[in-house]
Image (cartoon, grey):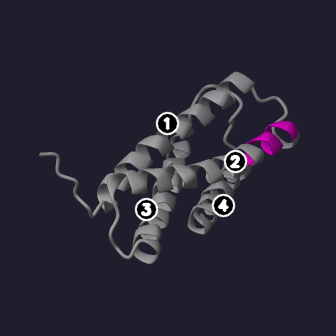
Amino acid sequence: MKNALLSGLIIGVFSGLWLFIMYKMGYNLTDSKVSPYEYISVLIPIIGLLIGVKDYRDNYLGGNMGFLEGLVQGFKILLFGGIVAIFAAIVYINYVAEGTNFQDFSGRMFGALLVGLLSALGVSLLYTTKSNKVD
């Protein structure tokens, strides 16, 4: 649980910082148009999950992890990261970009959720070391 909390906190903080960096760089996040630099934010959960799940496998499970264990750990990491990122998004919407369309922004957050879930699936497939044969 400690690993998931730390990795999720890192993902959430970097995701929140990315919102404010995009705003300071002058990109408009209030409309439905996606700037090309927003696609860089996809790397935040992927890298965070890669580091977090690998650390969990190597340090907590002794280098031997099943697919479901990795998937559950990835979901825990994303849960904690999502809580921090949503808090940062609420601060951003209420205090920084007050004219933000909530529908467009919630669409962005749903897209981030989808990217996170697909990343968790891929990372757990990548780091699985135990194979369960069905005979």
Counting the numbered discs, the total is 4
Q: Residue at x 30, y 57 (%)?
A: 126
Residue designated by label 2: 83
Q: Say which amino acid is labelled 2.
A: Ile
Does the magenta segment cover residue 68?
no
Does the magenta segment cover residue 93?
yes
Q: Residue at x 56, y 52 (%)?
A: 76
Q: Earlier in the sequence, mark 2 or mark 4?
A: 4
Q: Which mark is residue 9?
A: 4
User: Disc 2 on helix, strand or loop?
Assistant: helix
The Cα atoms of the two marked residues, 4 and 3, are separated by 14 Å
The Cα atoms of the two marked residues, 2 and 3, are separated by 19 Å
The correct choice, above or below, for 103 with respect to 39 in the image is: above
Q: Say which amino acid is labelled 3.
A: Leu
Q: Residues within 10 Å of mark 4 (few under 14, many from 20)?
A: many
The Cα atoms of the two marked residues, 3 and 1, are separated by 16 Å
User: Disc 1 on helix, strand or loop?
Assistant: helix
Say which of 78 and 11 sits in front.
78
* Residue placed furthest toward the right: 95
Q: Earlier in the sequence, mark 2 or mark 3?
A: 3
Say which of 85 and 36 sits in front.
85
Q: Quadrant of residue 109?
A: top right
Horizontal side, residue 56 vs residue 109: left or right: left
Q: Earlier in the sequence, mark 3 or mark 1?
A: 3
Q: Which mark is residue 20?
A: none
Residue designated by label 1: 114
Q: Say which amino acid is labelled 1.
A: Leu
Q: Residues within 10 Å of mark 3 (few under 14, many from 20)?
A: some
Q: Are marks 3 and 1 in contact (CB under 8 Å)?
A: no
Which SS type dominates the magenta stretch?
helix
